Image (tube, rainbow, N blue to C red):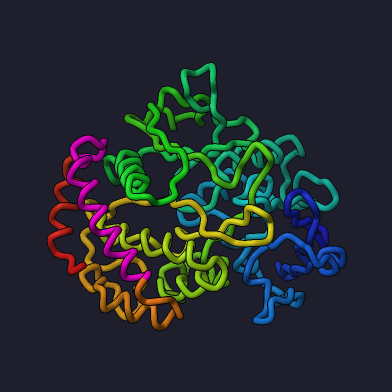
Amino acid sequence: MADVSVLNVKLYDETIGTLTHVQGDRTIFSFTDEYVADENRPILGLRFKDEYGQLITDWPVKQKRLLPFFSNLLPEGHLREYLSRLAGINKEREFFLLWALGRDLSGAITADPADGDAWPPGLSEDSAETTEKKRENALRFSLAGVQLKFSAIHNEQANKGLTIPATGVGGSWIVKLPSIRFEGVPENEYAMLTLARLIGIDVPEIALIDIEAIQNLPKGIGDLKGQAFAIKRFDRTEDGPVHIEDFAQVFGVYPDDKYKSASYRNIATVIAAETGETGVEEFIKRLTFCTLTGNADMHLKNWSLIYPDRRTPALSPAYDLVSTIPYIEDEETALKFARTKRFDGFTLDELSYLAGKAGLPEKPVLDTAKQTVQHFHEVWQAEKNNLPQDKRVTVRIDAHLKTLRI
């Protein structure tokens, strides 16, 4: 293998930096001089700013892994193992995973080979045609996370169905297939996001789609039965991509640490500083909603910032809202609120403490939480039997609500 391989890191299709792989499986990230000099530069991520808002340009060399910001663009768990096999590379060698998947990442970022090669010279003994085919197969699953999902294109000719692009690039929808382990997850997520929208939470366009209406699924996947969940990508618009980053990227932690290293109070502190009152109100609404519905999986990667004007962050639309307690009995949420992780510890007193530690005005925080609780109960009683979630989900949420103290 060549001693040096380089990926151009692009933001809105403009090269802003490079990831350079050298001997010893080490990777170095650096910004371009042009990006550093641009006072109106688009924001790559909050982690790249110091306490004075200045760009940090000196980053440590990483071995096998990339900097956390880039590592969080890659899939996790079984999906990473599967994609690594498809691409013919070691799952731990993140530079090469990014090489394979870098054309369809979250947000407005892409990673392209600097010399135009389809694959780093010497990495594979396969022909150029075979290695490119491997890359295209892997790209079809390229979105970060652990669940089997695809980037898809709306298909007007398929009765409002979706098509998985053959190249794996360009989809404006995310399709999540039924879980083999847990029944009814697509219907659960659709119901929870519908409820969230009804109580005023910002939610993208969503749909439940018969698997038969999804064209170009990989062989064997179509054998799954039931419905898939589809959500419109809020990082894709008619005017081009919109940049986003999740809070694992914001806090500079690897995906393995998404359940630790920070709390909801820490997230609230950032949101208050970067987005102001509007972002705080939306955050408290969602935190309350997730407590009421028993969502024990709102880890750092399930909260994101979005940059509509390329420089100013806002809290992104909600996603991955699922009631997890029907599948896994849990009395605790993914992260601490401020002092506790227990659902029944989410009280007005705990919120007062969170607000004080995060530097938030107490009264708006408490008022938002109380209004959200009242609105949720009204909507839940009116709609719970009209939504597509399994009856077990409804029963479990009803039982859960009786244990809460807010």
Residue 250 image offset from top left, x and y in percent: 57, 68
Q: Position of residue 255 (x, y in %)?
A: 50, 64
Left or right: 146 with respect to 123? left
Image quarter in which the C terminus is found = bottom left
Given residues 50 and 118, the one toward you in this image is 50
For residue 275, what is the image quadrant?
bottom right
Q: In which quarter of the image is the N terminus?
A: bottom right
Report the number of numbered marks: 0
Q: Where is residue 66 in the image (x, y as percent from the top left)?
A: 65, 66
Q: Nearer the viewer, residue 370 or 59?
A: 370
Q: In the figure, 4 relative to 147: above or below? A: below
Instruction: Look at the picture and state if 230 lies above or below 337.
Output: above
The residue shown at (51%, 55%) is 316
Q: Position of residue 137 (x, y in %)?
A: 60, 38
- Magenta span has 380? yes
Q: Which of 260 and 194 is in front in this view?
A: 194
Q: Can residue 293 be seen in this view?
A: yes
- Magenta-highlighted stretch: main secondary structure? helix
Q: Residue at x 51, y 52 (%)?
A: 81
Residue 96 vs 189, above or below: the answer is below
Which residue appears at 62% of the width and 40% of the height? 237
Q: Assess whether residue 178 is covered by the magenta stretch.
A: no
Left/right placement of residue 289 relative to residue 396 reads right
Q: Give the range drawn in magenta.
A: 364-390
Which residue occupies the foreground of this view, 29 or 380? Answer: 380
Answer whether residue 1 is visible to the viewer in this image: no
Q: Which residue is drawn at 39% across and 51% down?
A: 201
